[in-house]
Image (cartoon, rainbow, N blue to C red):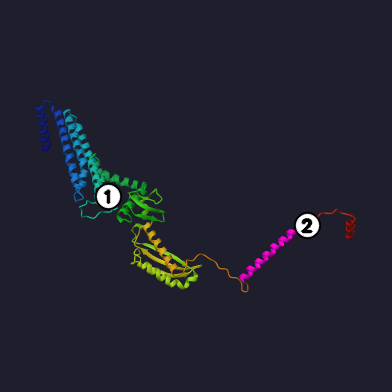
Amino acid sequence: MEISDSATHLFSQSQDALGQWLHIPGWIALPALILLAAVIIDLVLHFTLNRMERRLCDSPRRWDDPILHGLRLPLRWWVWITALMVGLGIIGAHFEIERLTAVLSRLGALITLLLVGWGGIRLFRRLEQRLVFPPVKCHAKPVDPTSASALTKIVGAVLIVTLLLIGLQILGVSMSSILAMGGFGGLVIGFAARDVIANFFGGMVVHLDKPFVVGDWIRSPERQIEGIVEDIGWRLTTVRTFAGPPLYVPNAWFSQISVETPTRMVSRRLWETIGIRYQDIGKIENITHDIRDLLQQHEEINQDELITVNFVTYGQYSLDIMIYAFTRETDWQRFHEIKQGILLKIRDIIDQHGACLALPTSRLYLPEGLDREDGERGGTRVHRERESGDDNGASRSSGDRHRPSRAPGPSDDSEGEGDA
């Protein structure tokens, strides 16, 4: 209390001395002098911190540049706000506004908390970039974007919650009331927003377990999800589908479904079945031997994995050869180029042995004693007889058509009577 009284007394003496020296009332001169000092300090901070930040960009350390970047703008704002608050306090003390000092003190503390939160957010954003893309001279290994994002988000959430609790305490809310209210409110919010909370914890599990990271190709047949991961948030994960539009997946799903990550595969499987004609059964062994040699000598085939080339079954119309191997290349487009080259070389091997690929065919067996050529000749003879018969019938029909008709006579009547 004595320190506060002595500071107030010294402040009053300085105000009176400044007013006598400038021939201006002290309650006007002192705030003006404080604002002038704020201008000078702001200019000094602007040029100094900007130059330091440019130099620290080339520093081999990850922390100094983000710290300076986070403090630069909030610190300059704090200088101006402090000067303004002090000036308003001096004017309020001159006019004996007692509550103004308490209000300004509380408001200044809240604004300082906001500036600290702003600086922390700027610091974490720049630090996330430095973790993923370290400086050129830095010997530390880069951190994957998912881990860096998870770290900054967790620390940022802790900072915001801490500043919020401090702000409530500054406003006069007791911590016991906050905790009791938080327990009851948490229970109510938990029932009302259980899906949101489930997605939040699902996102935290994804960040910690890392079944996939940003940039991975994922797919889940259970939910028909397939695409490239673009962002992993606290509630949703953005997946860019191969058709083009983005797919927003709730994080809670990933704790209930199985997810494949083809991006993390170390090799791609080549599994094909080649069909040879039954007429080339004597060449099967040589063909399979040459195909196996082709795969074992191919530079794109992973020799550490299983390589199998075998005649496996008698098909309905072909002799089936199974080809099973793995390529070193995992890129989808490049894999199919390699696969095309291998299949074309297999075609050449089959041609070199005088064999052919099988096509779906069917064979007709005739009964014994029936010659196919005799049947064809007999069928031709029958066809010709039918054609000649049709011609004779046509000529008879035409003859009957042109025969003259005669008028009925007496003889016809008599014949008709006799028949009767």
When the figure is inspected, residue 35 is found, relative to residue 398, above or below; the finding is: above
Q: Residues within 10 Å of mark 1 (few under 14, many from 20)?
A: few
Q: Secondary structure at mark 1?
A: helix
Q: Is residue 304 magenta?
A: no
Rendered residue at 89%/56% (across/down): 413
**From this viewpoint, is residue 72 visible?**
yes
Q: Which numbered disc covers residue 364?
A: none
Classify residue 317 as left or right of residue 138: right
Quadrant of the snapshot with the N terminus:
top left
Distance of mark 2 from mark 1, alpha carbons? 110 Å
Q: Quadrant of residue 351?
A: bottom left
Instruction: Give the position of the C terminus as an image quadrant.
Output: bottom right
**Quadrant of the image occupied by residue 99:** top left
Residues 104 and 319: in front is: 319
Is 310 placed above or below 174 here? below
Q: Whole-percent x and y of residue 18?
A: 10, 29
Q: Is residue 43 left or right of residue 369?
A: left
Residue 254, given in percent of the width and then of the height, sits at 36, 54
Lateral position of residue 269 relative to residue 58, left or right: right
- Three-letter code, disc 1: Ile
| Mark 2 surroundings: few (<14), some (14-19) or many (≥20) residues within 10 A | few
Magenta part of the chain: 371-398
Relative to 35, residue 281 above or below: below
The residue where tag 2 is placed is 400
The residue wearing badge 1 is 154
**Rendered location of residue 384, percent (x, y):** 68, 64
Q: Is residue 376 magenta?
A: yes
